[in-house]
Image: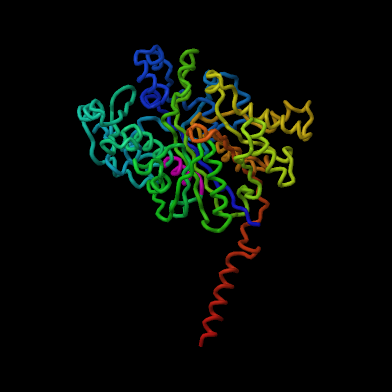
């Protein structure tokens, strides 16, 4: 059987202090219910600088500059121990400041909904044109020459409830207009969310091209797997983000679609991409997702209350390239896929049994046959102050305990197992972003270096959030070190030989007709 491979991954962060205040759902809810609250007054004092954001260890880990396990050597709290000499550019990605990102939102706007103040638009266009990745791969930067506005015009749109404000350092520099007079699915707030998701995903896609051998022309299919939804009142959430994002980077040969399953969406999308490549439908597939503005500062109340900086200030995005077996990139074992079925049960033990233990059992493996697991990789410094604990650690303890129950590990080994199979959480709490995928960049390099032979990527989701079911969700898949055998095509015959066989057969057929 010929398995697809994971050829590369890219990761983007965008620090969005003003969006924490004006678009994060915790703060917008507070403004609606209690506009004079102490939280809203104190929040601005707890926002950190871009430099502090860049030097924050989990952020450096996310973009590829600090292997997750090396974070264990840095004392916590991490926000008090910045990485010396940290840069915004990383091996797998980049951290972008908010001013540039507001320009990105204008650059991906195809319907003249984004209005930027004229001098700000001119300045940010200059920055994006000079950006080594955006300037090279985005084909829509000409949008930044169009339709600037004055501060007065922008303020009038915002005050008239016709547009969502765009702030930079608490100064109004732009807005996103509603796309329809009364359609709630095209409101100014929804369009802001969707354009932010689109822009951050398009940034991650451009980074993927910059960091790998993949070209925009080489992409044949794109799967977008965020938690946002685009459509109008007749098809709320109908999509398609995927092609809209590919358009920004000039992926003229690609088609695509969206996949949704709350936090588990990326795991589902990667399995789908692997299946499409394995079946020979497409040769190069990209799975990607942008960030969710609603989740910015989601736990900010607890952070502010406890005197902590608001470290939930970044949009997260990623892109992953799945392609045909090249003989070197890590293999996606499409025959070892875990799934939380409708009848699996919702207890933590039942979930882990279904998505971690069961697929290994079916493959004749045990939990010990996997070197490392990438679970929900939320940064614990975000979740612990809110009472949610250390999510990755809890998952690793559950996997180890499951191994003890199945007599794969001794009880005395429990702590050592957790240490050996896991890593600290380093991803922003953007819902779908932490769910397994942040480790893929490191996973590829570690397999190429011979440090890891087999990893399991685990994605979990809360389907009950949609109020249509009480069910939980979960998907996992195995990534393995490549054995060095490139894709041989159907039946073990290489593709060139197949082409020659077909040509000969056509030649013989043509001769038989004479």
Q: Is residue 446 left or right of residue 168?
A: right
Seen in the picture, residue 498 relative to 29 is either above or below; the reply is below
Where in the figure is residue 215, as x and y percent of width and height?
Answer: 46, 51
The image shows a total of numbered marks equal to: 0
Q: Is residue 448 visible?
A: no
| Closer to the camera in the image, 72 or 507 | 507
Q: Is residue 400 left or right of residue 130?
A: right
Asked where in the image residue 158 lies, by quadrant, the reply is top left
Asked where in the image residue 411 lies, by quadrant, the reply is top right
Q: Residue at x 67, y 36 (%)?
A: 372
Q: Is residue 82 left or right of residue 47?
A: right
Inspect the magenta stretch and tell me whether residue 108 lies in it.
no
Q: Is residue 165 visible?
A: yes
Seen in the picture, residue 372 relative to 483 is either above or below; the reply is above
User: Magenta residues?
Assistant: 202-212
Where in the figure is residue 132, as x and y percent of width and height?
Answer: 41, 41
Image quarter in which the N terminus is found: bottom right
């Amino acid at each position: 059987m010929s398995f697809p491979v994971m050829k590369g991954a890219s990761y983007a962060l965008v620090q969005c202090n003003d969006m924490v205040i004006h678009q994060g759902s915790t703060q917008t809810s507070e403004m609606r219910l209690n506009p004079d609250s102490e939280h809203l007054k104190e929040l601005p004092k707890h926002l950190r600088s871009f430099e502090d954001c860049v030097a924050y260890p989990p952020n450096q880990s996310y973009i590829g500059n600090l292997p997750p396990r090396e974070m264990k050597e840095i004392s916590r709290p991490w926000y008090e121990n910045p990485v010396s000499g940290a840069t915004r550019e990383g091996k797998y990605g980049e951290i972008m400041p908010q001013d540039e990102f507001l320009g990105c939102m204008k650059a991906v706007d195809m319907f003249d909904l984004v209005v930027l103040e004229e001098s700000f638009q001119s300045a940010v266009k200059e920055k994006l044109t000079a950006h080594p990745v955006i300037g090279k791969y985005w084909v829509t930067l000409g949008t930044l020459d169009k339709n600037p506005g004055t501060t007065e015009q922008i303020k009038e749109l915002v005050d008239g409830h016709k547009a969502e404000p765009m702030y930079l350092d608490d100064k109004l520099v732009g807005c996103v207009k509603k796309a329809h007079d009364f359609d709630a699915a095209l409101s100014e707030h929804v369009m802001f969310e969707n354009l932010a998701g689109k822009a951050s995903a398009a940034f991650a896609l451009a980074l993927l091209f910059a960091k790998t051998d993949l070209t925009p022309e080489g992409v044949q299919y794109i799967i977008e797997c965020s938690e946002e939804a685009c459509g109008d009142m007749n098809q709320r959430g109908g999509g398609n983000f995927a092609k809209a994002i590919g358009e920004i980077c000039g992926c003229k040969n690609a088609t695509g679609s969206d996949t949704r399953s709350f936090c588990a969406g990326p795991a589902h999308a990667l399995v789908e991409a692997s299946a499409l490549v394995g079946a020979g439908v497409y040769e190069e597939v990209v799975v990607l997702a942008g960030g969710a503005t609603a989740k910015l500062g989601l736990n900010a109340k607890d952070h502010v209350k406890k005197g902590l900086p608001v470290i939930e200030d970044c949009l997260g995005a990623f892109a992953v390239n799945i392609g045909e077996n090249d003989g070197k990139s890590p293999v996606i074992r499409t025959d070892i896929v875990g799934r939380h079925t409708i009848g699996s049960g919702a207890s933590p033990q039942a979930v882990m049994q279904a998505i971690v233990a069961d697929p290994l059992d079916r493959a004749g493996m045990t939990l010990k046959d996997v070197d490392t697991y990438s679970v929900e990789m939320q940064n614990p410094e975000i979740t612990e102050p809110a009472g949610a604990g250390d999510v990755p650690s809890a998952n690793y303890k559950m996997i180890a305990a499951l191994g003890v129950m199945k007599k794969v590990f001794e009880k005395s080994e429990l702590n050592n197992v957790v240490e050996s199979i896991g890593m600290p959480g380093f991803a922003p709490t953007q819902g779908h972003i932490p769910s397994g995928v942040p480790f893929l960049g490191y996973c590829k390099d570690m397999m190429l270096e011979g440090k890891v032979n087999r990893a399991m990527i685990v994605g979990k989701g809360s389907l009950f959030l949609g109020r249509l079911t009480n069910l939980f969700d979960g998907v996992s898949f195995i990534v393995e070190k490549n054995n060095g055998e490139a894709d041989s095509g159907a039946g073990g015959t290489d593709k060139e030989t197949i082409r020659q066989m077909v040509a000969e057969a056509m030649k013989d057929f043509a001769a038989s007709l004479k």
